[in-house]
């Protein structure tokens, strides 16, 4: 009879362990799902910001006044517009510490979460930035060349004359 009483007093222990196990499982699943989503969104955002900064720098290089519009067009073509879908975009020309031939594009986005909000109550946000340099009136990459030679023969040394 004493054995039966001991068994009854320990009968709720499995439920407590199951509850703690489920909390840990939801936390790990939330970290995997929401962390992967945040990483993917950040990578997409960085690509868009890089391209926007390059578009602005190209406009500076070509001495046009469309740099701001070009950068915003690149961002909107990639699905990012300032003030929409929790996106904040800042285009700075010139960035602090640089001259007027530089441009910086900064984007912050808050990403909605699927599971992690059960464990973590803060926002899941990322910030990406890109800085580009465009020198007015110069060809992009001035001073550099790409040369491909086929069946090139030299006479007497390692020098190749290209005319």
Image: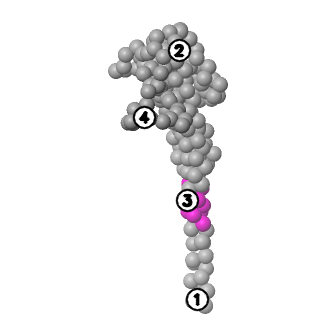
Asked if the stretch drawn in magenta spans residue 145, the answer is no
Q: Nearer the viewer, mark 1 or mark 4?
A: 4
Residue at x-position 56% and y-position 68%? 17
Q: Which residues are magenta?
A: 18-27
Q: Nearer the viewer, mark 3 or mark 4?
A: 4
Nearer to us in this view, 161 or 42: 161
Label 2, label 4: how far apart the Cα atoms are? 45 Å
Mark 1 nearby-residue class (10 Å; few <14, some 14–19, many ≥20): few
Identity of the residue furthest to the bottom in this view: 1
User: Are the residues flagged by discs 2 and 4 in contact, CB closer than 8 Å?
Assistant: no
Q: Which residue is mark 3?
A: 24
State the SS at label 3: helix
Q: Which residue is mark 1?
A: 3
Residue at x-position 51% and y-position 23%? 53
Residue at x-position 46% and y-position 25%? 162
Give the vertical position of 91 relative to 23 (above or below). Answer: above
Give the x, y percent position of residue 98: 36, 19
Q: Which residue is mark 4?
A: 155
Label 1, label 4: how far apart the Cα atoms are? 102 Å
Q: Nearer the viewer, mark 2 or mark 4?
A: 4
């Amino acid at each position: 009879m004493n054995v039966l009483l001991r068994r009854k007093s320990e009968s709720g222990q499995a439920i407590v362990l199951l509850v703690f196990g489920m909390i840990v499982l939801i936390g790990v699943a939330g970290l995997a799902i929401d962390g992967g989503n945040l990483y993917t969104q950040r990578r997409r955002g960085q690509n868009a910001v890089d391209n926007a900064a390059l578009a602005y720098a190209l406009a500076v290089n070509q001495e046009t006044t469309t740099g701001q519009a070009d950068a915003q067009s690149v961002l909107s073509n990639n699905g990012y517009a300032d003030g929409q879908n929790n996106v904040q975009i800042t285009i700075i020309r010139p960035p602090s510490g640089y001259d007027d031939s530089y441009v910086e594009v900064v984007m912050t986005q808050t990403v909605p979460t699927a599971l992690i909000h059960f464990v973590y109550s803060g926002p899941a946000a990322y910030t990406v930035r890109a800085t580009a340099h465009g020198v007015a009136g110069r060809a992009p990459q001035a001073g550099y060349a790409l040369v491909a030679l086929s069946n090139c023969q030299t006479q007497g040394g390692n020098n190749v004359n290209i005319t």
